[in-house]
Image (cartoon, grey):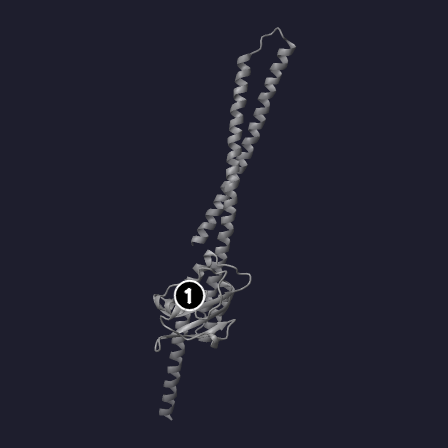
């Protein structure tokens, strides 16, 4: 909703800027015309004085006209300053509008991705959707999805991209960066993204997959696509939102798979008993 409100607020502000520009331009034109008219009156008085040297000039009228011109000049300068200020505000608004559009597009993509995640209860399909989201939304090139085995308290890779799944190490809960993030539930990003050297036990990014405060696994990223040189502000929001949706989808699909297996086992037992 915040994106929509910003969008409407931005549209109203744009309309306000256009009205200020229009009024400022019209007023400036009026000032210029009035200035020209007064100057013309002064020239007429000066010309009359030259043509009729015996007729005393109206010095008070001339001074009054000159003062009026001076006032109009000051008002014109103020209007021009205000127009320059509005132009700067308009440029800032245009930049902000682009940012809002990009953010809205990202949120729309996340909404679609979330819908896809929750559209199936098949674990392999959920995993494949997660991999595609991390590639397309985050821009990751080499990464893996690791799930926590609560019986052994260790993290094992269940899916990967750009790296063979078997290459990813088994990590004990609390061990190294990956194990610590799985234990604390905090996001991890390397300080110097540009000079990061790939280390399978020390990823550039580690995002815990959490259901509330319960961590069921992590997404580990080791490299980004060539066109992705850094993370934008919205990426950090996407990481957090994605981790929650992905965790829920994984957990639901695993529960469904287990219940299906149990149901199949029970049905097989019933079939044996009734034969």
Pick the residue in front: 193 or 270: 193
Residue 4, above or below 169: above
Seen from this angle, which residue lies furthest top? 54
In the picture, the quarter occupied by the N terminus is: bottom left
Q: Classify 10 Å Cα crowding around label 1: few (below 14), some (14-19), many (20 and above).
A: many
Q: What residue sits 53% from the left and 30% below the top? A: 77
Pick the residue in front: 132 or 230: 230
Instruction: Report x, y in % for residue 140.
Output: 50, 65
Drawn side of residue 243 relative to residue 53, left or right: left
Q: What residue sits 37% from the left and 68% below the top? A: 180
Residue 89, above or below 103: above
Instruction: Report x, y in % for residue 42.
Output: 59, 18
Residue 95, above or below 246: above
Q: What residue sits 61% from the left and 14% below the top? A: 46
Drawn side of residue 265 relative to residue 132, left or right: left
| Residue 72 appears in the picture as rendered | yes
Residue 264, above or below 170: below
Instruction: Report x, y in % for residue 5.
Output: 44, 50
Instruction: Report x, y in % for residue 213.
Output: 34, 66
For label 1, the SS is strand
Count of numbered circles in the view: 1
In the picture, the quarter occupied by the C terminus is: bottom left
Seen from this angle, which residue lies furthest right? 51
Q: Name the residue under label 1.
A: 207
| Residue 122 appears in the picture as rendered | no
């Amino acid at each position: 909703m915040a994106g929509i409100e910003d969008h409407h607020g931005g549209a109203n502000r744009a309309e306000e800027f256009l009205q200020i520009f229009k009024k400022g331009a019209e007023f400036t034109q009026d000032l210029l015309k009035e200035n020209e008219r007064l100057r013309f009156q002064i020239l007429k008085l000066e010309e009359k004085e030259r043509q009729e040297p015996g007729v005393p000039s109206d010095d008070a009228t001339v001074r009054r006209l000159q003062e009026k011109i001076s006032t109009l000049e000051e008002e014109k300068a103020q209007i021009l300053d205000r127009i320059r200020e509005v132009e700067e505000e308009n440029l800032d608004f245009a930049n902000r509008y682009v940012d809002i559009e990009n953010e809205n597009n990202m949120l729309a993509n996340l909404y679609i991705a979330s819908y896809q995640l929750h559209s199936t209860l098949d674990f392999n399909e959920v995993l494949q959707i997660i991999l595609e989201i991390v590639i397309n939304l985050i821009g990751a090139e080499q990464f893996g999805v690791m799930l926590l085995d609560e019986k052994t308290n260790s993290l094992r890779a269940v899916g990967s991209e750009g790296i063979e799944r078997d290459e990813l190490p088994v990590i004990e809960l609390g061990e190294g960066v990956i194990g610590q993030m799985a234990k604390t539930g905090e996001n991890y990003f390397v300080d110097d993204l540009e000079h990061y050297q790939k280390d399978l036990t020390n990823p550039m990014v580690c995002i815990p997959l959490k259901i509330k405060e319960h961590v069921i696994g992590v997404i580990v990223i080791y490299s980004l696509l060539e066109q992705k040189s850094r993370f934008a502000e919205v990426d950090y929001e996407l990481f957090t939102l994605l981790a929650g949706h992905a965790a829920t989808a994984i957990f639901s699909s695993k529960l469904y798979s287990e219940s299906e297996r149990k149901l199949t086992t029970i049905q097989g037992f019933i079939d044996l008993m009734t034969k």
